[in-house]
Image: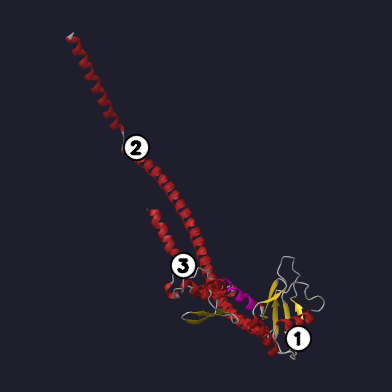
Amino acid sequence: MPKVQEKNSSASKTSNAAEQQANLNDDANVTPSHLLRAIETLKFELKEDNDSIRKDINSSRQEMRSKLDNISKEMQGLTERVDEAETRVGQVEEVSTELTRTLLQLIKRQRITQTKLTDLESRSRRNNIRLFGVEEGAEEKSVLQFITDLIRRELLLPSDLDLKIQRAHRTPTRKPGPNAPPRPIIINFQEFTTKELVLRQAWKKGRIQMKDRSIYFDHDYAPEIVQKRKEYQAVKRALKSSGIRFQTPYTSMRIHWRDGVQVYSSAHAAGLELRRRGFDVEVPVSTAEEEAGESRLQEILGWQQAAPPPPESRPSTRQRVKEKLREFARNEDK
């Protein structure tokens, strides 16, 4: 057996030596011309690959450049639109401010005109008296004759006094229902002194009873004055319940406190004073809507628009676009 193994080992060594010799013979057969042709072939293949890669790079670069150009155009268009929007907003703010100022001036003029108109209407009513509480139909056929007889019967007036009543009629509104309060009667005197005398005598007598109704005389106020006087209703009820004397001349209120007489120009001011003195009363709110509207306009006008930066400190459209592109390039590199 040892002899057989030795024979196999020597055979394998012989075959390996033969293969090595064959490889050496092949390497010896490669000539320089073969190597040059192989190198040229490799160069050609590398050149083709380089050309293909260069084309791909150029195509990608061209595509990216086209996209950047489109982005630049879009950014420029958006910037121009934003600039135009800012300009228009600024113009609208300026117009709004001017309109608000003009509207406030018109409100002031309208208030002055309304005050003059109310004064003129009040002067046209200065010879009138309003009689409240007379039952509907009590005047029968002649309101003028009914009022003349009522005044002479109920009031202490000189017997030879000529009342000189020019007109007497119900207020020109729809006739009320059975349970509604009757319409007041408007009495127009020719002379103001006679009207004042009748009114003083009526107030001096106090309550005047007619059947089962109490009637009373008052000035014929303009509607605006009547509305302002109605605002004192809650204050009047609180003062009456406490037995405090008060008077309401025109649109103000005079209250006779223990520490002195105070005059209040509005129901709101009078209500605040009652609250301060411990009265449980709801503070009246003024019904003048134009005052609230004017306050809101004053608040709006108090808002000042931000001053735009000077032109030299604002970057141009081209600079802003370049900065956006640089920022885009930095983001792409990341």
| Quarter assignment of residue 187 | bottom right
Residue beneath disc 3: 318
Q: Is residue 239 above or below residue 71?
A: below
Residue 108's disc number:
none
Q: Nearer the viewer, residue 326 or 195?
A: 195
- The residue tagged 2 is 34
Task: Name the residue rendered at 71%, 90% in the picture.
Answer: 158
Q: Amino acid at mark 3?
A: Arg
As helix, strand or loop, the secondary structure at mark 1 comes to strand
Farthest residue, direction bottom = 160
Q: Please say whether residue 93 is visible from this viewpoint.
A: no
Number of numbered discs visible in the structure rendering:
3
Q: Which image quarter holds the N terminus?
A: top left
Is 226 included in the stretch rendered in magenta? yes
Q: Gap in Å between the C-alphas at discs 1 and 2?
A: 145 Å
Residue drawn where x is 46% and y is 67% of the image:
318
